[in-house]
Amino acid sequence: MKAGIIGLSSVGKSTLFQLLTGAAAPAAGRPEARVGIARVPDPRVHALAEMYKPKKSTWATVEYVDVPGVAKGEGAALVDLPALRGVDALLHVVRAFASETVAHPDGSVDPLRDAKMLELELILADLGAVERRLERLEGNIKKAKKPEDVAERAVFIKMKDWLEGERPLRELVLEEDERRRLRSYSFLSEKPVLLVVNLGEDGIRGAAAFLESSGLVNLAARPGLALCPVSAPIEAEMGLLSPEDARAFREDLGLSEPGLDRVIQTSYALLGLISFLTAGDDECRAWTIRRGTRAQVAAGTIHSDIERGFIRAEVVAFTDLMSAGSLAACREKGTLRLEGKDYEVQDGDVINFRFNV
C-alpha cells in the first residue's frame, strides 16, 4: 500500500509523516517530496512469534509520501508530482488546533473549510488534465479516426462534465470497460481520501463531539472518504515516554490505542485491505491483500511460483490457533482445514500453501 500525505502548510503534515515513518525532520529550505515506510501494527505477529520462536518476524508495511503543502490555487502542482503517481490513497491532514506561534495560512482554523477547499483543488487539477487529454484526442481523431481514441474521448467527455460540476471522480460511476481505458492514468480526485484531523490536547479529549459539530462527519459519509482524529503533538510527546507512561497518558486522554495505529488501520479499512499470516521456524509474517482475494491469488503475494503451482491451502483462523496452542492441536479439533484455489481469504487467516512447480 502506498499513500500520499497532502494538506495546506502549517497543518502538521510533515510531523505526522515523521511520526509514522521515523524519518528525520526535513532540511531547512528544502520543500521536496519525501518517502518513508511505516510498519502496520499487528499484535498477531507478536503472538505467532511467541509461539514459533522464528528467526525473524516481518510486519506488513505502508509506504508514505510527504509532499510540500499547497495553497489555494496551487492544486494543479500536485498532478505533476512524480511522487504521487501510483498512490493507492491520499491522507489529507486538516488542522483543528489553535496556536499562538504557528499561524494558519488562511488566518483562522476551520477544518471543514480546508477539507472542502483542497478537495476542490484536486477536482480542478484533474479537470485541467482531462481537458489537455481531450485536446490531444481530438487532434488524433482528426488525423486518423481510430475506434479506441473515439471510445476514450467519450469517457473523458463524461469525466469533464462531472468535474465541471465540482464533483470528485471517485463518485463517478463508470462501466468496467470505461475504467479499463483509464488504467494508465492517475487522477487525484479519483483516489480514496482519509481526512486526518490534527487536534490539540483539549480537542483530542472531545474528538467525537468536535468531528460531529464541525460537519466533518457528514462530509466523510460521502463515497471514498474516511475520517481519523489524531493529535500529532501529543503523539510526538508520547513517543518520548516509556511504554507504560505512554499507556497511562493515553488512558488519561480517553484513548484506547495510539493515534498513529488508528491512522494506518483506518487507511486499511478505507481501501478494503486485510492481512493473512504465515508462521514457521524461519519467519512469522503478515501479508496485505484486498478483501475478497481468493487463495490462489493470495499465494502469489508471497511468490509467483506458489500461485502458479498452487495445490491446496492449509488454513486456520488466528484465534483458533491461539486457543488450541499448536497446529497439531488444531488438526485434532478440526479447526485446521484444507481449502481450494477459490477460497476467499479472511482477515487473520494463518495459511500454509501447498504447491508444486
Image (tube, grey):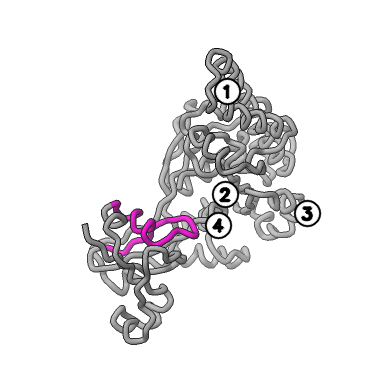
Find the distance from the CA under tag 3 to the CA under tag 1: 41 Å
Asked if residue 150 shows in the view, the reply is: yes
Q: How far apart are marks 1 and 4 (CA)?
A: 33 Å
Horizontally, residue 136 falls left or right of residue 47, namely right
Residue located farthest toward the bottom when viewing the structure as drawn:
332
State the residue at coordinates (62%, 63%): 253
Image depth: mark 2 or mark 1 in front: 1
**Residue 23 located left or right of residue 313:** right
Q: Earlier in the sequence, mark 1 or mark 4?
A: 1
Which circle, 1 or 4, is nearer the viewer?
1
Where in the figure is residue 167, as x and y percent of width and height? 71, 37
In front: 153, or 117? 153
Residue furthest right as drawn: 213
In the image, 162 versus 21, the foreground residue is 162
**How packed is label 3: few (under 14 Cα within 10 Å), some, or many (20 or more)?**
few
Between marks 2 and 4 in the image, the one whose residue lies nearer the viewer: 4
Looking at the rendered structure, the kind of residue marked 3 is: Ser
Q: Residue 269 carries which label?
A: 4
Q: Name the residue under label 3.
A: 213
Q: Which of marks 2 and 1 is nearer the N terminus?
A: 1
The amino acid pointed to by label 1 is Arg
**In x, y percent, where is residue 319?**
43, 76
> What residue sits right under mark 1 in the picture?
133
Tag 4 secondary structure: helix
- Depicted 277 relative to depicted 186: above or below: below
Q: Distance between the residues labelled 2 and 4?
A: 25 Å
Residue 287 % position (x, y): 38, 58
Residue at 60% across, 45% down: 193
Please tell me the numbered disc located at residue 114: none
Q: Which residue is label 2 attached to?
A: 233
Question: Is 242 positioned to the left or the right of 219 in the image?
Answer: left
Residue 28 against residue 95 in the figure, above or below: above
